[in-house]
Image (tube, rainbow, N blue to C red):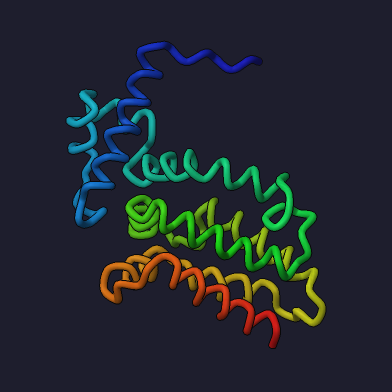
Amino acid sequence: MTPRKERADAARNREAVLAAADDLFARSESPRSVSMDDVAAAAGVGKGTLFRRFGDRTGLIRVLVERRIEPLRQAVEAGPAPLGPTAEPRERVLALLDAVLQFKLDNRHLALALEEAGSASPYQADHYAWWHTTLQCTLRRLPGMADSGFTAHALLATTRADLVEHLAGQEHMTPEQMRSHLAAFAARILDS
């Protein structure tokens, strides 16, 4: 059975909702302060439209994040080195971590909103599972990497949005400093 084509007005509403939500999260001091009522009003749609389309606030945030992460996902799954699957494992691990950090720096408001959503563990989210699996599989290719699952979790913890926000906001660390520190830390883990 072929999927039903989306109506033009439904597509316009979806785009209006995503643009409004993205703008509200970007301008808010705290992602928690953005409600579905706020998004509906900014998009000019009824709140019911939001819930039918996205399920809840977390579902809306996930769609925004997935839309932004898709080009990166394609580069990781099928692109050239250093991110792509044919890269040398050590180089790829460092590139993957840098890509996660850069994504969170570029999308601080959305990454923080998603991690703060609170409806379930951030470690059970699809995007986290994908990053973890990709990193774990790459770590397994390194000689002597006994516990690639734990190491992947530990390395990804260094890129949590709340940590990135703390380092940027409270410690005034620049993106370049964060990326440099992360690369040096990950290299020490991989070389130990």
Left or right: residue 56 versus residue 2 is left
* Residue name at image x 66 percent, y 72 percent: 149
Relative to the observer, which residue lies in front, 132 or 178?
Answer: 178
Above or below for 11 versus 33: above
Which sits in the foreground, 78 or 162? 78
Quadrant of res 32: bottom left
- The answer to whether residue 20 is left or right of residue 74 is left
* Residue drawn at (62%, 76%) of the image: 150
Q: Is residue 118 visible?
A: no
Q: How many marks?
A: 0
Q: Quadrant of the C terminus?
A: bottom right
Percent of width and height locating residue 168: 33, 68
Please determine whether, in this image, residue 117 is positioned above or below residue 179: above
Query: What is the x, y in percent for residue 119?
Result: 37, 55
**Image quadrant occupied by the N terminus:** top right
- Expressed as whole percent of the image width and height from the top left, the position of residue 65 reads 44, 45
Image vertical order of residue 83 relative to residue 73, above or below = below
Q: Residue at x 68, y 80 (%)?
A: 190
Q: Residue at x 32, y 53 (%)?
A: 109
Image coordinates of residue 56 in percent, x first then y, are 34, 41
